[in-house]
Amino acid sequence: MQKSQHQLYDFIHKYNLDGSEIIKIWIGLQDFISEEFYGAEAAPTQPDCVNLETFSYALVEVDSRAQPKEMTITVKDKDGVAVKDLLFPALERDCSITIQAE
């Protein structure tokens, strides 16, 4: 992790903040800045999955037998368990995506 990521993680835990609320604020700021600098047509920022409360890594798996080939990226914690999305916790979904690979 980069120093800034550690600082954000420490800040969230020091003040017992809700990580999903911090991300919603961050997304709002990014959208505001994009619109101010690039105009209303700028694409809004919307991540598919966020969890700032867990140190994690991304595991990339490629299925070369699938047609077309597929690549699955799953965010996992230190124990290898898929990290849960905290941006939309009611959905109870893992931070994972499968896309077509060339």
Image (cartoon, rainbow, N blue to C red):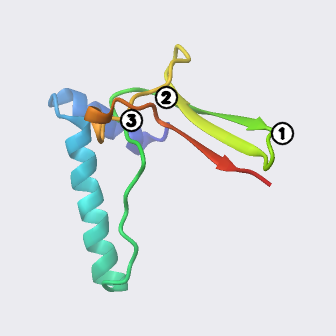
SS label for mark 2: loop
Q: CA distance from mark 3 to mark 2?
A: 12 Å
Where is 48 relative to 8, above or below? Answer: below
| Earlier-in-chain disc, 3 versus 2 | 3
Q: Nearer the viewer, mark 2 or mark 1?
A: 1
Residue hosting label 1 = 64
Q: What x and y, as percent, mark residue 100?
A: 70, 51
| Residue at disc 1, secondary structure | loop
Residue picked out by circle 3? 6
Q: CA distance from mark 2 to mark 1?
A: 26 Å
For disc 2, the marked residue is 56
Q: Left or right? Give the position of 47 relative to 40.
A: right
Q: Depth check: give the residue in front, 19 or 49.
A: 49
Residue located farthest toward the top when viewing the structure as drawn:
79
Q: Quadrant of residue 102?
A: bottom right
Label 3, label 1: how far apart the Cα atoms are: 36 Å
Front residue of 33/41: it is 41
Residue 76 % position (x, y): 52, 26
Q: Is residue 18 left or right of residue 40?
A: left
Q: Residue 54: which quarter of the image? A: top left
